[in-house]
Image: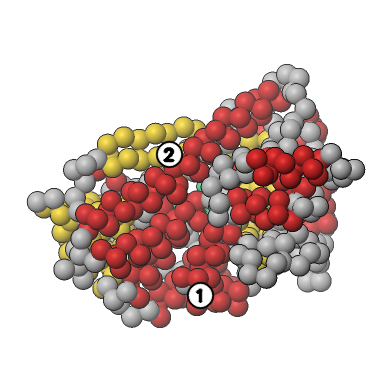
Amino acid sequence: MVSRIVVAGGGIAGLSAALLLARQGYAVDLVERDGPPPESLGDIQEWQRPGAPQVRHPHMFLGLFRHLLHTRLPDVHADLLAHGVDEVDNTAPPGAEAPAGATVLASFGSRRATVEWVLHRAVRKQAGIQVHHGLSVREVVADQGRVRGVRVDGEVLEADAVVDATGRRSPLVGAFIKEVEESPCGNVYHSRFYRLMDGVPKPPTFLVPVVFAGGAGFGGGLYAHDNRTFAVVFARLPEDETLGRLRETGAFEAAADAVAQFGPWLQPGSSEPIGDVVPMAGLTNTWRELSPETPDGYLPLGDVLCTTDPILGRGASFALSGAVELSELMGRHKSDLAAVGAGLRAHAEHELRPWYEDGVHDDVERTRSWRATVSGEQEPPAELPLGVLAALAGQQDHRLWELAQLRANLMAAPDSLDTPEVRERLDAVLTSDWEPPVLSPGPTYPELTNALAAYGD
Ligand SMILES: Cc1cc2nc3c(=O)[nH]c(=O)nc-3n(C[C@H](O)[C@H](O)[C@H](O)COP(=O)(O)OP(=O)(O)OC[C@H]3O[C@@H](n4cnc5c(N)ncnc54)[C@H](O)[C@@H]3O)c2cc1C
C-alpha cells in the first residue's frame, strides 16, 4: 500500500504535486532546499530562491497552465486572481465574441515568485502536507527494486514513493538515467523587474508592438506581470560579448531606452526598478530517458525529465501537466507504482517529446538566423512563422484564430497547424485584399550595439 510520499523540490511541479496528492489522501513530506516565502506578498521581491534562479526572470503562463490550474486547483487559480494577477482572454480575436462552449484560452504573465507564494499558501492550509524548508534531498534510497525513502542532509525520510521535482539540475535523477539528449538553447537572458508609478496605465500583456522578438540577432520584450510590475528582458547569443555588456546596469538601461516601444513604461516618472539586472546562462534543451532498472516509486516531474528553452515560455505548463498526470495515475493505479512510473513516461513521450523536438528545431533555426545577423551576413527576408501568420489572419477567419491559439497555448500538438484546412483558410485570407499588420520590429542589431557603445563613451 502507498501512504507516504516524499516530494523533493518545491517549485511549480513539486508544490502542485504535493497539493494534488494530499487532496487524494496521501501523507506528503515536501522537502525544499530554499527557505519559505515571506508572509506578505508585498515582500516577495526579497525572497531568496537560489535553488530556482529563473524566479528572477519574467514568466508567461500559457493557456495550458491556466486551464489546468483553473480545472484542477481552482482555489489556487482564484487566489492568484485575488492577489494581483490579471489574465488575458484570447479565446476570440480582440473585439469578437467567443463562440458558445469554446475552450477558454486565457494566459497570464506573473512573477514566478508570486505564483509560488500563492501555491505555498494553499499548501500551508492543506491537511496532510508537512513542509521541510532549508533541507536538501541528497539521494533516493531504494531496496529490491522499490523506493524506500530519501536521504536528506544526514537522515533518512522513509516513503513509499519519491516525486523528484528538483528541477533541471536534479541531483537525484543521475542514478536512474539511461540516456540524456542535450543541446544548447543558444541564448543568455538578461532581465530586470520594475514597478509602475501610480496612474501609469499597465502595459498590455501580449501586444506585438511591446514584445519584439527574434530575427534581429537578439530577442527581447517587456512583459506585464502581477501587481503593476513588469519585466524587461533581452536574450542574446552566448558568444556575443558585445551584447554581454547587458549584464551592466547602465548598459542594460541604455539598451532598453533604445527600444522605442518600451518608452511609455520606462520613461522617467513611469516606473522604478525593483531589482538588479540579472543574467541567466547555461540554458539547454534537455531530455532524460530513465533506465529500465529505475526502482518502482521514483517519479520524476517537470524540468527533471524535460527542459525547454525559456524563450518559448512552456516549462511551467509542462511542470503542472506532469503533476496533474501523476495525480490521475495515482488515482487509477493506486499501489501499482510500476504502472504509475510507466504512465508518467508515456505521458512525457506523447505530450512533451513533440514540444521538446519542436523547441530544439526552433532553436537551431533561431540561432542560425541570429548568428547571420551578428556576423553582418545578408539575411533573407524573415518569413512569419505559421503560428504567427495564422493568428494574424485569424482576425479575418476566427477558426484560424482558434487553431493558432490552441497551438500557441500548448493545447493542440506542435504540428496541428500543418493541415490542409489551415492552408486553405490561410490562402483564402492571403488572396483576399487583407494585408498582414506591419509588425514593429524594434531596434536593429547595429542600433542596439550603437546604443551600448554610446553608453560606454
Ligand atoms: C530564464 C528562464 C525563464 C523562464 N521563463 C518561463 C516562462 O516564461 N514560462 C514558462 O512556462 N516557463 C519558463 N521557464 C521554465 C520554468 O521556469 C521551468 O520549466 C519550471 O520552473 C519547472 O518547474 P519545476 O518545478 O520542474 O522546477 P523548478 O521550478 O526549478 O523547481 C525545482 C525546485 O527544487 C528545489 N531543489 C533543487 N534541488 C533540491 C534538493 N536537492 N532538495 C530539495 N529541493 C531541491 C529548488 O530549490 C526548486 O525550488 C523559464 C526558465 C528560465 C531558466
What's the amino acid at mark 2? Thr
C-alpha gap between disc 2 and disc 1: 31 Å
Q: Nearer the viewer, residue 102 or 334?
A: 102
Q: Which mark is residue 286?
A: 2
Circle 2/circle 1 CB separation < 8 Å: no
Q: What is the secondary structure assignment of the residue under circle 2?
A: strand
Q: Residue sitting at 84 percent across and 45 percent down?
A: 437
Q: Looking at the figure, which quarter contains the C terminus? A: top right
Quarter of image, res 24 = bottom left
Q: Residue sitting at 39 percent across and 34 percent down?
A: 181
Within 8 Å: ligand 1 and the Cβ of disc 1? no
Q: Which residue is mark 1?
A: 74
Q: Nearer the viewer, residue 211 or 43?
A: 211
In this picture, is 282 found above or below 380? below
Q: Position of residue 55 (x, y in %)?
A: 52, 56
Between tags 2 and 1, which lies in front?
1
Q: Nearer the viewer, residue 256 or 424?
A: 424
Q: Residue sitting at 24 percent across and 55 percent down?
A: 339
- Examine the rendering and report whether any part of residue 342 can be seen: yes
Bin the neighbour count of mark 2 within 10 Å (Cα to Cα): few under 14, some 14-19, many 20 and up.
Answer: many
Residue lying furthest right: 433
**Left or right: residue 431 compared with residue 136:** right
**Left or right: residue 192 compared with residue 425:** left
Q: Position of residue 438 (x, y in %)?
A: 85, 42
In this picture, is 18 found above or below 318? below
Q: Mark 2 vs mark 1: which is more N-terminal?
A: 1
Bin the neighbour count of mark 1 within 10 Å (Cα to Cα): few under 14, some 14-19, many 20 and up.
Answer: some
